Structure formats: C-alpha cells, structure tokens
Image (cartoon, rainbow, N blue to C red):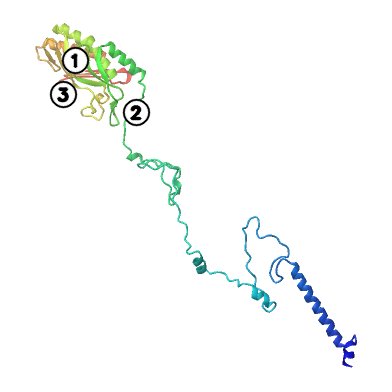
C-alpha cells in the first residue's frame, strides 16, 4: 500500500510542490555548470567573457593579480588558488640583492680639453649654462701688447725710403718701437751715415726725420763748412734721437718720444777741427757766422729749431724736429 501511495501523488498536494522545486533547483545548477564551461575565465573572477588582449597601445603588459574566490561558495577553487600577497620592500631587496640609483655621469663638451683657462669649459651639473660658450678673459688681466703694424708698408713710407737712397743715406729698418701708450715709432730707421758724413752714435728716428736731416746736411751743413773752414764734414755727433720723455718742465710729450727730433752736440771737420754747438766767444767771428748760418738754414727743413741763447736747456746743442703745428707755424729761435 505504501508503494501505491508513492506512485500516485495528488497534483495539488504539498509533496508534489516540493518535488517541483527540487527539479527546478537541479536544472538551475546544471545550467550554471554549462555556462562555466563556455566562458574563457572563472565565473567568480572579474574577467570579461571575450578575450580583449593583455595590453593597450600606450601601456605595457599588465599581469592581473589572482582573485580570491569566496571559500563558502567553492572550496575547491580555494584549494587551487595561490595566495595573492604583495611582496614587501624587504622582500624585493632580498630578491634583487640591493637597489642602488645609477650615479650621474659627468658630461663633457665634445672632445676639446680646456688649456690654460682658454677654450671650452667642462660641463658640470652645477654649471649647465657653460655649454658651447668660451670662457671670456678678463681684459684687466691680459698683457698689454703693442699693436701690430700692417704687413705691407704704407706708400708714404716706401716713397720716403726712396728719398733716403737718393740722398745717399746709410740706414737700416728696425722693428716697431712701443714704449707705453704715447711713445713709439711704427716704421723706425737707424741712420749711420749721410754720404761720407758719419753719424755718431747712429740715430733712431722716423724716415721723414731722417730725410729732412739728410737734406739739411748735404745742401747746407757741408757747403757752409767748406765756405767757412775750407774743409768737409767728417762726423756729426748727436746727443739724442728717439727717447721716450717729456719736454723739460712740462707734461707735454717731447718729439723725441715720437722719433721726430735730433739734438746736435758737435760737428767734426775733415781737417780735425771740432765745432761745439754753444755760444761762441766775443771774437769768434767765423764760428759764430757758421753756427748762425746752419741754424737759420735749418728753418727751411724743420718745424722747430732751438739752440744756444733760447734757454738754458739748449745752451749746448741744436734741437731739430718736424712737429706739425696748425697753420704750418715754424718755431725758429
């Protein structure tokens, strides 16, 4: 009777309702297991059902951390999954032995090494603005050198030397002379003789001064000596040619500092007679006439002629120079 009662269960009875609920639950579980077998991942993991790749265009590959499943939902997944524990810094250091930052390497400019404070400086992190900029020298520490004269001699200097050859002047060219900011000669010459007349000591002057003095010697001095003493001139003894100095008792640079002046102390004749340039005695008529003649004739060749009687500083010599003055003024005293 019991078997009959299990076989025939009324449709509306409570027992029939429980059987239908059990069948429905069984069907839902079966459907869930079928869905899991169709997806690419775990139903409990936060992964899409479609494979979209593991990286994007701008990001590197990212490894997804394992996701812990709910232990109450599926104990089997809990047994298979590894614990997702983030490694500590100490663990990372132990894995990679020791983490040290790379030391910055010094950067140098090209392959040029600075030499004696010139050229390019080495670029250092504390001085990044010196890249490709040369070090500037302090003008106050630079040695003062004389300006370089042109490699080609000017035309007026060339013509002047042609005049010296025509006047039979024995000379030689010297290197440029520079004594400070004011004194000096760009193209000096050293005169040792004018024809047969010796110059002792040899005079260092400009070419223009040498030409003026040579013309005065040949055209006036020698003829005046022959006329007065019936003798030629052997030697002219000069006391000063180029000399970097000021005019006595003033702040003005002397023409000697430019090589434009000569001081004549004594004239030696071929006869052996010496004529000192000084104020002659009361009855020295010939000497007085000779000195007055050559002094007056000098005003035709020089812009300044000073001698005995002008002042005490010129009591014993003739001073000749070619200083240029306004309106062509000549000082003959």
Q: Distance between the residues labelled 3 and 2?
A: 40 Å
Q: Which mark is residue 312?
A: 3
Q: How far apart are marks 1 and 2 (CA)?
A: 33 Å
Q: Do the residues labelled 3 and 2 touch (CB within 8 Å)?
A: no
Question: Residue 82: horizontal and vertical position, in percent?
Answer: 61, 72
Which is nearer the eye, 172 or 302?
172
Give the residue drawn at x 64%, y 76%. Answer: 79
Q: Which mark is residue 148?
A: 2
Query: Mark 2 packing: few (<14 Cα in 10 Å), some, or many (20+)?
Result: few
Kind of element beneath mark 2: loop
Q: In this view, does 299 lie to the left or right of 107?
A: left
Task: Locate residue 316: give its quadrant.
Answer: top left
Question: Residue 244: horizontal and vertical position, in percent?
Answer: 24, 28
Q: Distance between the residues labelled 3 and 1?
A: 28 Å
Report if residue 9 is visible in the image. no
Q: In the picture shown, does residue 187 fall above or below 65?
A: above
Kind of element beneath mark 3: helix
Question: Residue 187: horizontal and vertical position, in percent?
Answer: 30, 22
Q: In the picture shown, does residue 222 fall above or below 201?
A: above
Kind of element beneath mark 1: strand
Q: Which mark is residue 198?
A: 1
Give the residue drawn at x 32%, y 40%. Answer: 141
Query: Mark 1 packing: few (<14 Cα in 10 Å), some, or many (20+)?
Result: some
């Amino acid at each position: 009777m019991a078997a009959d009662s299990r076989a025939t269960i009324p449709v509306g009875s409570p027992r029939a309702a429980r059987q239908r609920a059990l069948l429905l639950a069984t069907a839902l579980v079966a459907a869930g297991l079928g869905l899991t077998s169709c997806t690419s991942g775990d139903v409990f993991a936060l992964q899409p059902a479609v494979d979209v790749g593991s990286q994007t265009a701008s990001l590197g590959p990212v490894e997804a951390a394992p996701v812990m499943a709910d232990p109450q939902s599926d104990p089997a997944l809990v047994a298979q999954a590894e614990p997702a524990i983030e490694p500590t810094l100490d663990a990372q250091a132990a894995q990679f032995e020791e983490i040290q930052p790379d030391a910055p390497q010094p950067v140098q400019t090209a392959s040029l090494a600075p030499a004696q404070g010139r050229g390019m400086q080495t670029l250092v992190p504390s001085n990044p603005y010196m890249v490709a900029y040369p070090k500037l020298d302090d003008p106050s520490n630079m040695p003062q050198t004389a300006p370089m004269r042109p490699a080609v001699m000017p035309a007026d200097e060339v013509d002047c030397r042609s005049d010296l050859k025509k006047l039979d002047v024995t000379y030689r060219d010297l290197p440029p002379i520079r004594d400070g900011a004011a004194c000096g000669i760009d193209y000096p010459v050293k005169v040792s003789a004018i024809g047969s007349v010796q110059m002792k000591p040899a005079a260092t002057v400009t070419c223009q001064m040498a030409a003026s003095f040579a013309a005065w010697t040949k055209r006036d001095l020698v003829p005046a000596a022959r006329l007065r003493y019936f003798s030629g001139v052997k030697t002219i003894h000069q006391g000063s040619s180029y000399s970097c100095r000021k005019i006595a008792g003033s702040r003005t640079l002397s023409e000697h500092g430019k090589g434009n002046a000569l001081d004549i102390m004594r004239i030696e004749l071929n006869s052996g007679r010496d004529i000192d340039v000084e104020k002659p005695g009361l009855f020295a008529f010939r000497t007085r006439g000779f000195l007055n003649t050559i002094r007056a004739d000098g005003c035709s060749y020089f812009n300044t002629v000073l001698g005995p009687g002008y002042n005490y500083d010129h009591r014993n010599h003739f001073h000749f120079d070619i200083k240029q003055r306004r309106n062509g003024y000549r000082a003959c005293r």
